[in-house]
Amino acid sequence: MTWEWILLGALALVLYTYFGYPGILLVWGYLRPRRGERGNDVGNGNKPLVSVVIAAYNERRNIARRIENLLQSDYPPDRMELLWSVTVVLTKRLILRRATNGFVS
């Protein structure tokens, strides 16, 4: 009698795995709002503030291209925060000179 309950429980777990859980996800997907219907979504122009972290050591030749790349991206510069950890003074000066073109402080 006990092995029958064990077999029935194992069968129930297998059925739940293949049919129950995907069914729950399907119903949940229909009930929750779509990506474009949320109030704080990227699609309606209310983009979140992002932090761009630059860790550089003696990258004087490459850092200017990286900052220009960030400024040319389609993400608004006023919603980007530039954080850096640089060890060479010339690279720090270059970042400060290039990064004042619209980044959040």
Image (cartoon, rainbow, N blue to C red):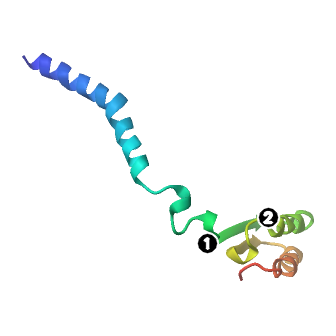
Q: Is residue 23 above or below residue 1?
A: below
Q: Which residue bears the numbered disc 1? A: 46
Q: Residue at x 30, y 31 (%)?
A: 16
Q: Residue at x 6, y 16 (%)?
A: 1
Dot 2: within a 10 Å radius of its alpha carbon, few (fewer than 14), some, or many (20 or more) residues?
few
Of badges 2 and 1, nearer the viewer stands: 1
Q: Are marks 2 and 1 in contact (CB under 8 Å)?
A: no
Q: Earlier in the sequence, mark 2 or mark 1?
A: 1
Image quarter where the C terminus lies is bottom right
Q: Which residue bears the numbered disc 2? A: 73
Where disc 1 sits, the SS reads: loop
Q: Residue at x 82, y 77 (%)?
A: 99
| Residue 38 percent coordinates (x, y) | 51, 64
Check residue 2 in the rendering and tell me which mark sits there, or answer none. none
Query: Residue 100's quadrant in the figure?
Result: bottom right
| Residue 62 percent coordinates (x, y) | 89, 63
Does residue 79 appear left or right of residue 73 in this picture? left
Where disc 2 sits, the SS reads: loop
Give the residue type that dot 1 points to: Asn
| Residue 87 percent coordinates (x, y) | 79, 72
Q: Residue at x 56, y 59 (%)?
A: 36
Out of 36 and 77, give the one closest to the viewer.
36
Out of 47 and 95, give the one closest to the viewer.
47
